[in-house]
Structures are given as C-alpha cells and as structure tokens.
Amino acid sequence: MSKAKIFYFTLQDEQTKEEKLDWFERTRFEQIPFDHITPDQKANWINLTDNDFDSFLPLIDKEVKAGKSQGAVFQLFSRGLETGRDEWVYDFSEVNLTDKVNYLIESYQTRLISSKRQEFDIKWDRELEKYLSRNIQKKFEEDKIRNGLYRPFSKQFIYFDSHFNRFPGQVPILFERQDLEITNICFTDSGSQKPFMVIVSDQIPDLHVVGAACSAQCLPLYRYDENGSRIDNITDWALEQFRRRYLPSPPQPSSPTGEEGAGHDLPSPAGEGQGERVNASGEEQQREKADQLVYVAGARRNIPEQLLLRAKELRQKQTPAEKILWECLRANRLHDAKFRRQHNIGQYIADFYCHAARLVIELDGEVHKIQKDRDGDRDAWMQAHGLTVLRFKNTDLSQNLEQVLQTIADHLPSPPQPSSPAGEEGAGHDLPSPAGEGQGERGNSPAGEGQGERGNSPAGEGQGERGNSPAGEGQGERAITKEAIFHYTYAVLHHPAYRVKYELNLKREFPRLPFYADFQQWATWGKALMDLHLNYETVEPYGLRQVDVGRVRANGDSPLQGSLIPTDTPDPAKPIKRTTPKAKLKADKIEGKIILDTETTLEGVPAIAWDYKLGNRSALEWILDQYKEKTPKDPTIAKLFNTYKFADYKEHVIDLLQRVCTVSVRTMEIIQQMPDTVEHQSSN
C-alpha cells in the first residue's frame, strides 16, 4: 500500500468569513493551488519550523521523570495545582475561605451520612463522588490553609487538601510541608495559544498561574524525601553538560623540564629548580598576591557598564545604617584609612572597602537571617582572594557604634608616617589604589550587592548576588552549580529573542536550553530577575502619584486638616451618607495612569512598566484584573459567600501596584541588556 500524500491550502487570515466563502463558491476544486506538504518527524503538518531548537538541552523529559533516563536538566516537574473548584478553595480573605470550606465539608458530610443534599449545594465532580463511595470522612483542618500564587503577583489563601483539589499532580509531594523551601520556575505548557510566559514562585502555584485557558508546568529547584531531606532536582547529567561546556580543561601534570605549559600555577616540588616559583621569597609571593588582587578589587578590575550605573544609584540611596557608618569612615576619618562605599569586588559589591587593609565591611539587615548560606559562599570567595570580611548587624550601628568602630580599627594598618607621600593610599603596602568614587565610572560597583536592607535593588531586599558567585570567578567547579543553572534557565526563558525565534517550538513542546556564550552573565541576570519576582512585596515602591478627588464626608469623619473658616453646622435631621467609590481598576497606558475607582487614580506610570508582560497582560494589569469585583459563577458562592469588595483591599492594592511598578521597570532594564539575537554554542 502506497503512503498517503498531504496537500494543503489556506486563504489569508485577513479575509473575512464572507470573502472566504465567496472565493470557494467561485473556484473549482481542481483550480485550488494546493501545496504538497511533508510532515516533520514530530508529525507537524503546517507552520513547520526550520531552526536548531532540537540541538539544545531538553529542559524536562517524561523518561527522566520516570527515572528511566538522566538526559534532561530537571528530573521532577509538575503541572500547577488544579482544584476544579477555585471559588470554593481560594480567597483573598482567610476568614471567608474558612467559612466557605466549613460549608463545603458540612455539605459533603451531610450527603455522606444521610445522602441528603443542601438547599444550596456545593460543586460535585467525579473525584468527589468517588470519595463518597469510599466512605472517606472529612473535617476542617486549619493548617491546610496555605498561601498560593493564583495569578502573577497575586497571592490568595488556598485550602490545600487532596480530596478537594481535583488533580493535584506532584504539587502535594512538593508542598506537603510548610517548613521546607520550595522555589518553582513556572512556564506556559505546550499546546497553549497564548503567548509564552515564565514566573517564579515560592508559594503553591495554581494550574492557571500563567493565565486562564492554559496550564503551567513547574520546575522546582529542590524536592524532598519522606524524611524532609533535600534532593537536588537538577540532574547530575545537566551539571556535567554545563561544566563540560563552560569550564576549562583541567591542568596537565607539571613538566620536569620546564616546557611550555608546565606548572599551570601549581606549586613545584621544592629544590628541583622548576622556575622562579620555587625560589620566590615570601616578599615576592606577597607581591604576586597583590598583583592578583588588583584585578579583583583594584584599579584594573573590569566592571560592566550596567553595573556601574546601578552602583551609582545605590550610593545615592543608602540605608540608615550605611549613612551612620559612612559618616564615620569617609574622608579618611578612621585611622586615616581610605574607605570606599558600594565598591565592586569581582562580581560582588562590598558595602565598604579599604584596599590598603584588604578589608570588607558588610552591614546585614533582617533578610540576612534567611540567606546565611549565600553570605557564607560570598565571604568564602572574598577570603580566598586574601580579603578579610567583617559583618555587623544594622542594629549594631545604632546601639553600639563605638564598639563597631573599634573592631574596624583593629583590622586597619597603622596610620602612615609623615614621610609617606601625602594622599597616597596604602603607601608601603605595594598595592595599587583602587579606582575611587569621583574618579570616573570605575568608582561605581555592580548591581544588587551588599545592600543591607535596601529594597530598591534588582534582587529585592538587598539579596542581589550575595549567593553563589558566577562562573569563572576562580572557584573551579563551584563556579557552575545547580543553583546557577537554575538562575541561567530563568534568564534564558525571559530572553525576547529566544521567545520570538522559537515561538512555534514553545507552543508545541517543552522548552530547551541553548548554551549562550557567557554563562556567568546569564546566571547573574537570572538571579536578579528571580530575586525581584520572589520579593515583589518588599521592594521599594515606585513613587506613583496618588490623586484623590474630593468626596463628601459623613458625620464622624475626621477632617483632613483644620480650618479657620467657619462652616455651617450639619443638620442632625439630614445625616450625610458615606458613599463607597465605584471600583474601576482600569489602565490608561497612553496617559500613564491607573484608575482604581471613582475617587482615586495613580499617575506617573512609566511606559516601560507596561512592557513587562506575562502572557497577554502586563504585570500591573494582572493585579488590576484579579482585584476587580466579579459575580461568582458558582450559584452557592454567589448567594452565600459573595463578600468581596475592592474597597476592603484598596490600600493593599495601591501598595502592591507601587511595588510591582518598580519590579516591572527593573525587570525590563535587565531584559533590555540581553542580546537582540540568539547566539549560542551547539550542545552536540
């Protein structure tokens, strides 16, 4: 039997229905200009792709998930939580959610015991009917109320129960315990007709966190066994692929004859005369370390332009603790030592740095209590480069400043003698002076580092790059870690050129990862984006102008300000009624406004903020959509539990919009630094 042939023809999408029908009516079948098409290996007939997508690393694979293979970046993946009854198990109000779930359970138990249905019934489905037939008893459990990410930048309380969540997938395995850290990259699943999007979450992600009518696939960084022991979800196979691609080949054994390439900075056996390293005196070795440090923290360090600009901003927005310490250190005030603030060291920023003493000072806010491992990695990197790191709590500056200054002074060299050339930093230490503030852009430092409690950093709450150092910073295999690959993945999935070039591929199959040339830069971008998106509720508000139109005050309202002008005494017989402004929640992108209700408008939204889109909406528009007043679809919810009023959440929404505006602007600033094309190295 011969193989079938496929012929295809389509009219232009711009034509109307009537125009298309008219064309077919006037055209004979044999006159239709069919194309003979050949399906590709994945059985796609139309909109065929001709690119290198298949040569990239598979992000996820069902064989890997089943434990039959290692050939993917992530082992476990899961769709978001599908409840089948969102209106019953989600709510902005914990109190209202508790009332709904109690009614839900009461109705279930009533039917289980007596087979009777409530007058206002709940939503039944096949799964819930199965639980009835199995005589499964239910009761309300308060600890099952959890936080969930329902839509982008929109959290709600959720009743997390496998019997009332229709298809939980792997989500209960990942989020069963509240005390375990889970961070997921969530992206639009294949088969969606909506634009591809990606968001990170440390809350329980909903199936439609990427939007209604499409589902989300979620990639956790870690998973846990039954004892709560953490397991890497990025495979060893993936780590090996990245290290093989980006790390240099290991050094060869030293040649005893001093041939070219011998040594590779490895120490030679004593007494064998294998070069100057054997005979180097302690003084020469010290000078060599100083020469190396100048490329890390001194004048010869190389600082990316975008990081210079960010550092300048950081110095203009010091935390209160930083201001206190800077007043004590600036202008050589402490032991005549020259300090610099927000100073670039490798890919980090030190809050304060003295080059002559090789001393780094960090001020830690509350956020550092939960990132001790990151700070430890950062300090270890600094120490490996010959630097001393002192850490103080922000509260130390206000409560025990004298002791802080004494501790710093104990780590400084003696003040220079008069014979030293005036104004030279670190005279007699053989260390070049670092490029300083006010000496051009080299005085600036990278973004997101050493920011204490600063909420305006791209990383949110000053987390910046305090975690693992990027690849290539002299840490050997530690330079490329599974966490760095996680950050790299998040950056690549945000890359506009990647999304455009592989748009059709992303609609049909799971994403794949190319090897971009600069792993370090992409991991840095990914971490900055991730910290922004995880900590969106704590970043600095953007400063949108709130404009409130006047409204008539009711009796008992406190006046906004006093007045010397006599006013008429209100007539008690005609009390003034308080009116609630009508909710609008509309965006005016042309004017840069957000109209909240008939009373309040936010102005000054920068145009770039609307450009940060997740699917077919901007981040700001997602918030507006979620907080609109809508009539519930479930008749029982509409009758008994329709209590939501925007006015109850107005102040929260204003604050949320202010912060997400900051997130949007900084997200776009990072994305705009990404290249305009997809330039990569083949993974084959």
Image (cartoon, helix red, strand yellow):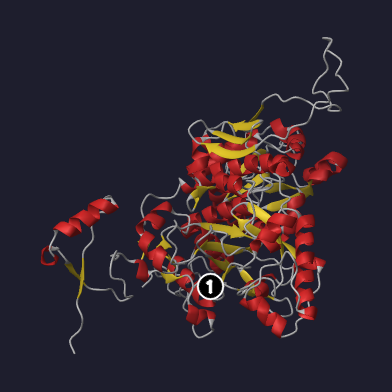
Image position of 342 with respect to 333: above or below? below
Residue 78 percent across, percent down from the top left: 57, 72
Q: Nearer the viewer, residue 37 or 66?
A: 37
Residue 388 percent across, percent down from the top left: 70, 52
Q: Nearer the viewer, residue 68 or 310?
A: 68
Q: Is residue 570 left or right of residue 662?
A: right
Tell me the residue at 28%/50% (across/down). Answer: 16
Q: Nearer the viewer, residue 336 or 200?
A: 200
Neighbours of disc 1 within 10 Å: few (<14), some (14-19), many (20+): many
Tell me the residue at 70%/24% (across/down). Answer: 550
Which quadrant is home to the C terminus?
bottom left
According to the picture, the residue beneath numbered tag 1 turns out to be 74
| Tag 1: amino acid | Phe
Q: Nearer the viewer, residue 351 or 177?
A: 177
Q: Is residue 336 visible in this depiction of the protein?
A: no
Q: Is residue 123 left or right of residue 554?
A: left
Residue 622 percent across, percent down from the top left: 57, 48
The count of marks equals 1
Q: Is residue 243 left or right of residue 48?
A: right
Quadrant of the rendered structure where residue 5 is?
bottom left
Mark 1, secondary structure of its residue: loop
Residue 486 percent across, percent down from the top left: 55, 64
Residue lying furthest top: 565
